[in-house]
Amino acid sequence: MKMPSIIPCTSSNLASKHSKIYQFINCRLVRKGCIIKDDFWIRDGKILNPEPVFYDERVQADVRIDCHDALICPGFLDIQINGGFGYDFSSDVDNLEEAVSKVSHGVLSAGVTSICPTIVTSPNSVYHQVIPKLVKKAGGLDGASILGIHLEGPFISPEKKGAHPLQYIQEVEGIDKINDVYGCLDNVAMVTIAPELPGAKDVISYLANQGIVMSVGHSNGNLEDGEAAVNCGASFITHLFNAMLPFHHRDPGLVGLLTSRLICKPVHYGIIADGIHTHPAALRIAHRTHPEGLVLVTDAMAAMGLGDGEHQIGQLKVKVEKLTARLVGSNTLAGSVVTMDQCIRHFVKNVGATLVEGIEAASLHPARVMGIEHLKGTLDFGSDADFLLVSDEGPLKVLHTFIAGECVYSAPDAPQLTSTYHKHFSEK
């Protein structure tokens, strides 16, 4: 029997789907680095292995959903996003709940199913207000999952501050200083720090042992500083090429971490593929040097989803003109206004990478950075059913976004998904 479209999902039909098995048919899957032709099964918000269901449970799917040859891929993770749609996480402190709601819901149209809200260098009072309020939470109809806060500062180099206010940049000094500035670390998932600062390596080791992802960035440090930081627990580079020493043949700086033989583990690196922050040639160099480490980030600020004009990032004013955001009265770049699907399209086009490589740079790779690749960033059995139906005919286009197996966004012109209900096999 043909049923009405399952799109859009509503709160009234969520409960009725509990424990039902959904089989997506007429689709292709991004799985294990390839595109394969196969059906896709989910139950209770998890990706399901159909073999034991068929042979052990002796049942078939409750609902079959025709995907019309769409490509199914993991949902995207944005681990550096400052705000969007008119809201800034570092300055809209009094409206933080509203800011998180608007941004986490707004990014669903770009296929983003998890984010790390990013707080730029700010007064101590901002950290003390924001960190306890910006809690980790699972995603759903209200918006993308909140994986935890990314604290980008204030322990950075004044010489490489970028769009961070100089008056709020601080010295590291030690663990007590970290606790004094941040107040608490309960909801913190990542911290960016300049590794050359006195005391930085002890702090990196301490916070990494607390389960916080440590990143090096906004740094005037050399390769040796970066290598020492990685060997102390750092595992990520914040927006490669931006706000760091430029590559030099005698000392490649933090960029040299991509090929260093003196570090205990390979690093991942964020890169803003918007055509403004990183030249396509530099993007190609990074990808060809260390493709497995490349993580697409938007570094989006309040103007994402809006238009030209003046906006806010942290404590500073920003002017946006023709997709370029700069601090008012200067030539300093101040975050981006691009969405994650735009970054993937730019990356694929300008690097010559495959669509699968672009998708994995926005899903599997950031999931690995956060240590959650067993839950997100793949279509592996047992993973969270955070996935997208996309069109890969020409530029990537997000058609439908799912979180925990529920449709949370559909593009206005996306083909309608129709459901067919089936009976279970009779037990033998």
Image: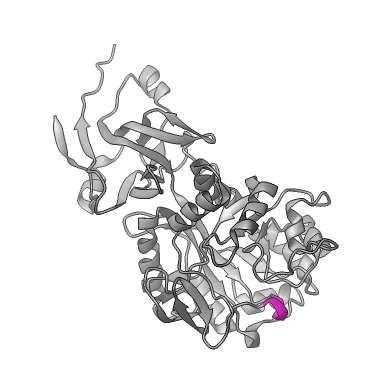
Residue pictured at 39% horizontal, 39% vertical: 72
The correct choice, above or below, for 52 with respect to 137 in the image is above
Residue pictured at 46% horizontal, 51% vertical: 76
Where residue 96 appears, as percent x and y from the top left, is 42, 75
Q: Quadrant of the C terminus?
A: top left
Task: Give residue 92's quadrant in the image.
Answer: bottom left
The correct choice, above or below, for 23 with respect to 327 in the image is above
Viewer-nearest residue: 325 or 235: 325
Q: Quadrant of the N terminus?
A: top left
Which residue range is magenta in the image? 155-160
- Please, which residue is most extreme toward the top here? 428
Viewer can see residue 133: no
Viewer-nearest residue: 346 or 96: 346
Where residue 141 appears, as percent x and y from the top left, is 31, 55
The correct choice, above or below, for 208 with respect to 401 in the image is below
Viewer can see residue 331: yes
Does 106 lie within the magenta span?
Answer: no
- Please, which residue is most extreme toward the right here? 250
Residue pictured at 36% horizontal, 29% vertical: 39
Where residue 293 appears, as percent x and y from the top left, is 64, 49
* Left or right: 133, with 417 as reference point: right
